[in-house]
Image (cartoon, rainbow, N blue to C red):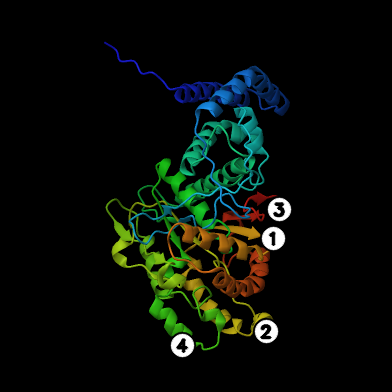
Amino acid sequence: MAAFTTLTPCQATTLHYNTQISRSHRLIQNAYCHDKNTKTIHTVISSLLNHHSPAFSSLFSQAKSTMPPTHFSISGSGSSWLQDGSLHHDANSGSALRQGPTYSVFPSKPAEVASVEDLFEFICAGPLVDKVGLTQEKVAESIDKWLFYGSKLCRLFQVNELYLTTPQKARFYHYYIPVFIWCEDQISQHASKFKDGEEIPPLVVWIKCTTGCGKTTLVFALDYLFRITGRKSATLSIDDFYLTAAGQAKLREENPGNALLELRGNAGSHDLPFSAETLKAVTKLTKEGMRMKFPRYDKSAYGGRGDRADSSIWPEVEGPLPVVLYEGWMLGFKPLPTEVVKAVDPQLEIVNKNLEAYYDAWDKFTEAWIVIKIQDPSCVYQWRLQAEIAMRQAGKPGMTDEEVEDFVSRYLRAYKVYLPTLYSEGPNGSDPNHLLVIEIDESRNPILL
């Protein structure tokens, strides 16, 4: 006898929703395939919306009454959806990244996802569409993928895909997914340079932004999307190559009175030979069975001063590896004339000198760059404070508010000196065809340049 399964109201609602969505986006795709005229396409889309509006309205009313709330909140002020630091390297497990507590500080009033047509219009209005080489036609042709990616990200970040706030939609469909599509294109371009049968080294995509801007969460989302679409990927941070606690203590002793080198962060506080050795090994992960461990840094050690995690708990990565995502706050900084840096702070002179060695250790391994541009470096303090609060709430030791202020001040001077050149000229040795510049606002969402 055939077995029958009784669906819960929530499951039935989801099934109904998926059926309606599937029919809608198939019709949108067909419209693009048969008639590229924008007016005709929008007529078809509008008719779909009119046809489905009552059904969708009823559908989401059912969904709201049967699905549990998935929004999180914290006390205090904030402007980002996920606090930077809630997703971070885990020095105590084999995972490359670990998801910590998820905090939503978006407006509490949700905005229903009314139809595929609404989502299509929302995607096409995004600030990165043109920058990543997308058109309305391309979005329509790949609408299945957009829906799939969005659904998976909703699950990853524990939000209700049928009941997203506008900032949540923006974070997924205006930011994470377009950047992922750009990375996919960069990987394809990279692979096309090699002949059939040749070993293809991983493409290293460097993601540069100020501390606390959300780049770690972006990397987490990209790495996840690569994995669910069948690509192996790995993540690194310049934090993974900070000096050990002993090495940092030696650096401090060799530069007495220089506050910029007292703690980790500025040029000179990284183990460059170790960094170069690791990146060279990464480029050789081209075959099945090849393995290596990726280093990790424990920021919580020594009361927040940090130390390199023991190698026994570093995550292991297996080849072949198509892509490595490498993020860091000072990637792409170039040494500048001594008088320029001394005018900002005389203590930067030695930092600037140290920066000369970074090209051979880092930049020469890079083929693709993502530069996340900020309007005002002063927001770094608030972002960093949020990260430390999240660490403390997760039960890990973090810096006090006063220590955060002191810590961030050591970065701000470097931002003042190096960011203008980075933004105007691009990273050292970068190719404009393999460079994506994204400007974000105080909420860490992309804006039109």
Estimate the spatial distance between the alpha carbons at disc 4 and disc 2, rounded to whole Å.
25 Å
SS for dot 1: loop
N-term-proximal mark, 3 vs 4: 4
Residue found at x 41% / y 80%: 247
Distance (Cα) linking label 1 and label 4? 36 Å
Picture coordinates of residue 350 (x, y %)?
56, 84
The mark that comes first in sequence, 2 or 1, is 2
Q: Position of residue 153 (x, y in %)?
A: 50, 41
Q: Earlier in the sequence, mark 4 or mark 2?
A: 4
Whole-angstrom CA distance, mark 3 to mark 2, is 31 Å
Q: Is residue 146 left or right of residue 47?
A: left
Q: Which residue is mark 3?
A: 449
Rendering coords of residue 163 (x, y %): 57, 34
> Which circle, 4 or 2, is nearer the viewer?
4
Q: Is residue 329 visible?
A: yes
Residue beneath disc 2: 339
Residue occupying image coordinates x 53% and y 33%: 147
Which of pointers 1 and 4 indicates the residue nearer the eye?
4
Q: Which mark is residue 375?
A: 1
Q: Residues within 10 Å of mark 1 (few under 14, many from 20)?
A: few
Q: Residue at x 54, y 36 (%)?
A: 146
Q: Number of numbered discs present?
A: 4
In this picture, residue 101 sits left or right of residue 383: left
